[in-house]
Image (cartoon, grey):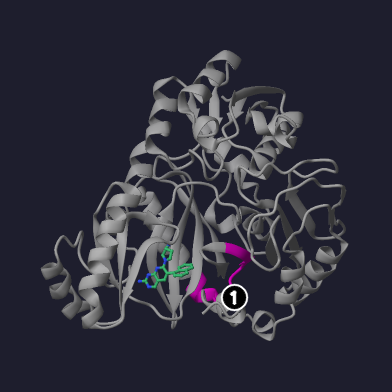
Amino acid sequence: MIKKLLIANRGEIAVRIIRACRELGIKTVAVHSTADADSMHVKIADEAVCIGPAQSKYSYLNIPSILTAAQITGVDAIHPGFGFLSENAEFAELVDEHGFIFVGPTSEHIRVMGDKIKAKDTAVKLGIPVVPGSQGEVKTVKDAKSWSKKIGFPLIIKAASGGGGRGMKVANTPEELEEAFNICQTEALSAFGDGAVYMERYLGRPRHIEIQVFGDGTGNALHFFERDCSIQRRHQKVIEEASGPSIDEKTRTDIGNVCVKAMSKMKYRGAGTIEFLYENGEFFFIEMNTRIQVEHPITEMITGFDLIKEQINVASGDGLSAKQQDIKINGHAIECRINAECPETFMPMPGTVELYHAPGGLGVRVDSHLYAGYSIPPHYDSMIAKLIVHAPTREIAIARMKRALKEYLIIGVKTNIPLHLKLLDEPDFISGDYTIHWLEELMGLK
Ligand code: MV4
């Protein structure tokens, strides 16, 4: 049983985890940098420990400092949230070795999925459809040329240790292959300390569809349907929706069942997201994330499950709270990520929130750590809130999101609320007809 839990994170996700703990009767310990002393998660936790200076490297990524805080406060468990140490296999291992429960998968599963070559190999063995490409690492230009004859052009070269859009090169023709391969290998080595690369057929106009999965670590597994996260700019998601507007009932059930079988076979524990590119009615696995994700609330809204509580229950050894047949889609949900940023350059623009008024009413949820008077520190992510709406239909959800965005007052800092209002009026968004390139094409970046 977990009686006290430390949240190794900050911002809205720390607040979200503290809220779940409070409802479960679990005491909470916030950790924070000196720059976050006045942050919401520090104020609402039962206890708080300063773990270092503003720079993440010395605070939110400082493993000895976090483990010491856990020991001093006598917690049973550590929740890593997302980002920071959430997918650090060594951290998961150390948490375990120090006698704390890590709210997440085993360190072995984190390690395997962190290596994109091993992840893809695992997916193949588990029966998940993958993008056709090289089998394992491509070590030399000679091997790259040989694989390219099987894969065809355009193709994409990816770093095994990459992810989130870093360490990728597209070769459109055989003439471009050698240089693209060499650059990718060199950049992978310098950026990640691992030069291993692999190759895939390049999909030109896919959607990014991800499946929310859960496992109890003993072979029981569930899926909570899909999210469409195609609306992104420079690999930063901007709007997400559940369910996916392009996915029909049979397609949804089929891919969900494939993912559940795979998670069951590998005895996966905790929350996971299986990421696919979806093109012409076909799913192609690209990566698996072994953490709770930013956009988990839209899945919570359409299924009615509290995914953070589900994570904590699984970590406690209480297992999953539902059977697959109990998980149903109710209505539609949309999330707009609210960032403190310059509307023209999209550069982060921190500052002090002079006045704050969050929207409310039927079907409106705000996950945020903001309050009037709060100074957004410049050291971390520019996302300051997630505005989530839930409605019986997609059409009503769009109307509800527009009215909620118009009610939202964040005075003192510039935000991307005007951008969201513009996007929600676009015919392609309204019809649901968009790919991963849609936003960048709309803004003339491509
Ligand atoms: C691809 C692809 C096209 N074909 N793989 C980018 C992030 C990384 N997770 C995988 N990514 C891509 N892999 C093949 N074989 C296009 C992308 C991609 C992308 C994927 C998901 C969401 C946004 C994206 C933006 C640009 C490129």
Report the residue at 67% width, 27% height from top.
26
At mark 1, the secondary structure is helix
Amino acid type, residue under disc 1 in the picture: Leu
- Quadrant (top left/top right/bottom left/bottom right) for the N terminus: top right
The residue lying at 71 percent from left, 66 percent from top is 343
Q: Which residues are magenta?
A: 237-252
Q: Residue at x 54, y 51 (%)?
A: 323
Q: In this rendering, is residue 151 above or below 390?
A: below
Say which residue label 1 marks.
439
- Whether residue 419 is visible, yes or no, is yes
Q: Indicate yes or no whether the magenta region holds residue 244.
A: yes
Decide: is 212 above or below 378. below
The reply to whether the residue tagged 1 has its Cβ within 8 angstroms of ligand 1 is no
**Residue at image point 65% right, 52% down:** 382
Q: Position of residue 118 (x, y in %)?
A: 27, 53
Image coordinates for residue 31, horizontal then vertical, percent = 62, 28
Task: Give the x, y percent position of residue 259.
Answer: 42, 59
Is 402 situated left or right of 207 in this image?
right
Answer few, some or many: residues within 10 Å of disc 1's Cα (few below 14, many 20 plus, some between 14 and 19).
many
Q: Position of residue 416 (x, y in %)?
A: 72, 63
Q: Is residue 366 above or below residue 397?
A: above
The quarter of the rendering in which ligand 1 is drawn is bottom left
Quadrant in the rendering for residue 77: top right
